[in-house]
Amino acid sequence: MARNTGPVCRLCRRENMKLYLKGDRCYSDKCALERRSYPPGQHGQRRGKLSNYGLQLREKQKIKRIYGLQEKQYKNYFKEADRQKGVTGTNFLVLLERRLDNTVYRLGFANSRSQARQMVRHNHFLVNGRKVNIPSYLLQPGDVVAVREKSRQIGAITEALDAVPRRGVPAWLELDKEKFQGVFRSIPTREEMNLPVQEQLVVEFYSK
């Protein structure tokens, strides 16, 4: 699968908000957005007001970059959300939050979603006692995500767990640090997700 290999701090500056793509660096004074709070590029400081289409596009790009998805995969999630009953925008965010790599990050086993994706790919996690190495695997309520016994001494995982008190664990997840496992307790509500995004703009973008 294609992935972004360029400097990710530029993405935060482009969206004018912290996307937390670099783990601990995003919480320090080294954060690029703290140093230069304007879009990257030669004309970054002179960009004017966005049109309605521009606002919709920026919101689409923001969510795509937060979860580290490619365009085709992102659009497929939206189509699936549109087919489901309920509010399309909320369904869309729920699908993204149910991804295994996102859940690994949310539980605190990784410092960023890209790191979580790599760890899942490298077979460091079990779901309900079975090895799963597909980052896009969608979790169901009651599923247990655990670090494999052989992987519990990996420095990146222990360091990420030490940072859990700072980041916190969402209400729909339950972490047991001693057992190196967590439970996907329930489908999150829009209020619980507490994401600084306007998903309705994405719905409008794809409704054209």
Image (cartoon, rainbow, N blue to C red):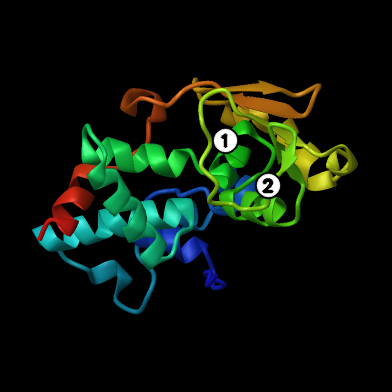
Label 2 neighbourhood size at 10 Å, few (<14), some (14-19), many (20+)?
some
| Element assignment for label 1 | helix
Q: Residue 162's image quarter? A: top right
Q: Is residue 37 visible?
A: no
Residue drawn at x 26%, y 59% is 58
| Element assignment for label 2 | loop
Relative to 79, residue 167 above or below:
above
Residue located beneath label 1 in the image: 106
x and y percentages locating residue 176 in the rendered image: 72, 21
Q: Nearer the viewer, residue 40 or 140?
A: 140
Residue drawn at x 73%, y 33% is 146
37 left or right of 27? left
196 left or right of 198? right
Q: Is residue 178 visible?
A: yes
Q: Amino acid at mark 2?
A: Val
Residue located beneath label 2 in the image: 132
Q: Residue 173's image quarter? A: top right
27 left or right of 119? left
Label 1 and label 2: CA atoms lie apart by: 17 Å
Relative to 11, residue 172 above or below:
above
